[in-house]
Amino acid sequence: MVAGGSGRRFGGRKQFLPLAGHPVASWSVRAARTVADGVVLVVPAGGPEDPTGALDALPAAGAEGDAALGATTVVTGGATRADSVRAGLAAVPTDAAVVVVHDAARPLAGAELFAAVVEAVRSGDVDGAVPVVPVADTLKRVDEGRVVATLDRGDLVAVQTPQAFAATALRAAHAAGGDATDDAGLLEAAGLTVGTVPGDTRNLKLTRPEDLALAEALLAGAPA
């Protein structure tokens, strides 16, 4: 569970803000626990802003139980997203067959979505699986403020997390270092196979402050 970002575009570390009575990251951890034997939570280095106080109650590395955000292991992230994922991956038991990577800033990913990507990998047909949704907007390529091309959106999709991977494939993709906006990109660069499952339009990523209000609205009536 990647929760090590600075939230620069949001204006603060949104992953620990309250959302419908719980820290944002706890919603993601709860969903992940429906398919995972354990959850490695990657937190920021250097005294993160934590308005809920949730980090103070997190279990120590390797601890069992469901304290605070529900993580079973907590590690400190790195300078980039890929560095943070590698820090979390290092804490995953070596006998794990499937590893799921999820951005804590997507608190509305449901248990069904986690199950779908895991099942796609367990089928053995792909090295990784990602949820995707069709692109609704017209997409254009822009150079120095001028439109230079209109893209055919027919074969374009928007990619979400959670993303599931065969553990050996994910470790191999990260072994060379490198960076990407998601882990599937590292597998693609390594020549590995990434499949897709239907995503969820409700599975928004908290990027701007108004996204938190939208998430609150979508969670209205959800079980506590």
Image (spheres, grey):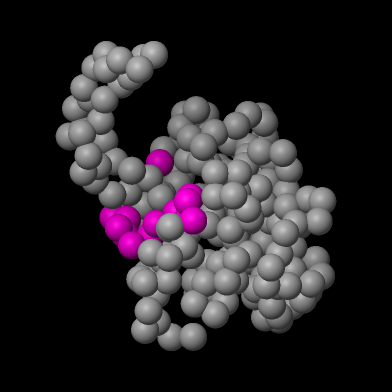
Quadrant showing the N terminus = bottom right
Residue 203 in the image: state x and y as whole percent. Answer: 38, 60
Figure check: 210 above or below 29: above
Figure check: 66 above or below 121: below
**Residue 39 sits in which quadrant?**
bottom right
Figure check: 217 above or below 187: below
State the residue at coordinates (47%, 51%): 208
State the residue at coordinates (60%, 60%): 15
Residue 60 in the image: state x and y as whole percent. Answer: 81, 70
Q: In front: 160, or 168?
A: 160
Residue 21 in the image: state x and y as whole percent. Answer: 54, 80
State the residue at coordinates (71%, 64%): 50
Report whether residue 117 is seen: no
Residue 151 drawn in magenta: no
State the residue at coordinates (33%, 62%): 202
Mainly helix, strand or loop, the magenta region? Answer: loop
Residue bounds of the magenta highlight: 194-209
